[in-house]
Image (cartoon, rainbow, N blue to C red):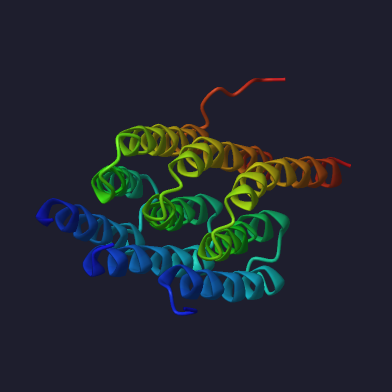
Amino acid sequence: MIAIVVCAVLAVYAGLRVVTERNTMKKLPFVNVISFGVAGVIALLLPHPLTILAAAAYFVGSTLESNAIASTWAGGMRRDD
Amino acid sequence: MIDTVMIACVALILIGMAATIAARDPFDKLISLSVMIAGVFPFIADRGYLDVAIAVALVAPISTIFILMACRRETA
Amino acid sequence: MISTPEFIAGMILLVAGSVSVAYARPKNYVTRLINLEIPAWGLLLVMLHFNESLALFTFAAISVLSTYIFVRTIQKREGA
């Protein structure tokens, strides 16, 4: 009961920090905080054994998305053609 | 769902939506869109559609990667 | 019955996202393409309110495909 509320409030606080941050690169750690919090909310929401798999799938997807944004912003894997 | 968690998820959706519309840089818009998508997933998991949640969570980053292909071509 | 939070949040996302696509502020293709993701998730929430499980699966798959087609169209338009 108290754990899921802590996860949700932490996610909202990190969301507010993402919106009020000016630098683009400094937004990405707070996106990671949102990912942790929402994965905790998904895992604690239902008493079902498949929720931990759903939380793991969301965490993998969110991490992949953040890494793709950061890699493109830094100009990674540039092919000189 | 507990009311506090529900209000937090709705707030996360609305914060992400407002920031996505208000931002000017494409990367800021994509990060804010990630905040909005994070608020949608607890509603899917709360209805009990865990298979739908797994499928959408694995398919949604591919959409972002396709948009990043267009972003890099424009800024370069 | 109609006042579940999924339905209200989905309708807000649909209306605000559609207006933001129609009147995009930096008036270029990438802004419209990113804003087009907002009504897609709003429609997903409205489908969730009506318990349409198969519609959720199909829409999530087809949304990615249409995004890929839009990106290829934009690249072909700007490369020419």
Does residue A24 appear to the left or right of A43 in the view shown? right
* Closer to the camera in the image, C15 or C2: C2
Q: Residue at x 53, y 68 (%)?
A: B21
Q: At 45% across and 50% down in the image, what residue appears? A: B34
Q: In which image quadrant can residue A2 be found?
A: bottom left
Whether residue C9 sits left or right of residue B42 in the image: it is right
Instruction: Report whether C12 appears left or right of C64.
Output: left
Residue farthest to the left? A2
- Horizontal and vertical percent position of residue A80: 66, 20
- Looking at the picture, how far across and down is residue A16, in whole percent? 29, 63
Relative horizontal placement of residue C46, taking residue A6 as reference (left or right): right
> x, y (%) of residue C47?
58, 61
Give coordinates of residue A17: x percent, y percent.
Answer: 27, 59
The residue at the point 52 percent across, 62 percent down is: C45
Above or below — where is B2 with respect to C11? above
Identify whether A75 is placed above or below A47.
above
Q: How many marks?
A: 0
In the picture, the quarter occupied by the C terminus of chain C is top right
- The outermost residue toward the right is C80
- As displayed, is residue C18 above or below residue A74? below
